[in-house]
Image (cartoon, rainbow, N blue to C red):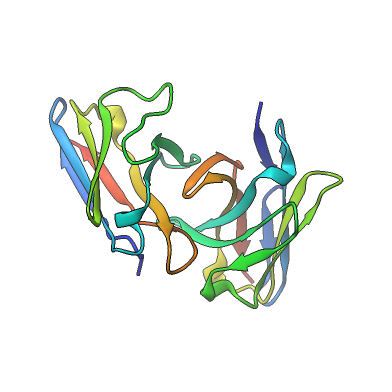
Amino acid sequence: QSVLTQPPSASGTPGQRVTISCSGSNSNIAGNFVFWYQQFPGTVPKLVVYRSNQRPSGVPDRFSGSKSGTSASLVISGVRSDDAADYYCATWDDSLGGPVFGGGTRLTVL
Amino acid sequence: QEQLVQSGTEVKEPGASVKISCRSSGYTFINYYIHWVRQAPGQGLELMGTINPRTGTTSYSQIFQGRVTLTRDTSTSTVFMEMNSLKSEDTAIYYCARRAELAWFDPWGQGTLVTVSS
């Protein structure tokens, strides 16, 4: 069981707004930045959001992140077929004294 | 260019050990923690442990404690992950990743496939 809880799957049609949630606790998300990773099959995870709501250079602006309390969200506005991938949230856990990952969400673009 | 390059595919029998290397380049090796992440087929990312390349201090996730050993060689800017008593369930891709801060992992190694089979 992951410390951070994500829905196992999410879906949307091209152009839709898709939200992927990440639920944690007071010892992790509430007091720390959240990071989001995108992983295509057979490839290395890639950072798409850092420090909860910042986008690395080269990541399309349709990707955005937010955080409120013990939860965080990754929003893809105007999802495209090539956004279909697995998405993982990650943050620091103060109780564990280290980083933690969510279980991952598989995004399907119908 | 900052990068981590891992050693190649391994095939091991149950009960054996495996040692994977992760060589860094393009940045100051001792300035950043290196983490190891396991991904079993069709599964998510599982943190295994971390090493401070400056001091050699290590920390392991509970499920890997006692079975995984992380070491480093500062002369070659390389971190090693050794796992013993391999089981079929250890078949996975193993990644090393540099942690810049908190849970910011970048870059990642290309991954090393370890297959445990008799």
**In the depicted structure, whether residue A38 falls above or below residue A77:** below
In this rendering, position of residue A48 left or right of residue B6: left
Q: Judge by depth and name the residue closer to the eye, B84 or B12.
A: B84
Is residue B23 something that shows in the picture?
Answer: no
Q: Residue at x 30, y 32 (%)?
A: A83
Which residue is found at the position 67% from the left and 64% from the top? B58
| Residue A87 picture location, percent across and down | 34, 45
Dividing the picture into quadrants, the one containing residue A35 is: top left
- Looking at this view, name the residue that lies furthest to the right: B75
> How many callouts does the rendering have?
0
Quadrant position of the C terminus of chain B in the picture: bottom right
On screen, residue A62 above or below A106: above
- Could you tell me residue B47's position as x and y percent? 51, 60
Lateral position of residue B52 relative to residue A86, left or right: right
Residue shown at the point (52%, 44%) measured from the top left: B105
Which percent across, then down, holds residue A13? 13, 32
Which residue shows up at 14% across the image and 32% down it? A17
Residue A70 shown left or right of residue B70 in the figure: left
Residue nearer the viewer, A96 or A16:
A96
Q: Nearer the viewer, residue B87 or B5?
A: B5
Q: Quadrant of the N terminus of chain B?
A: top right
Find residue B25 and report its horizontal and vertical position in percent. Answer: 73, 34
The answer to whether one can see residue B52 in this image is yes
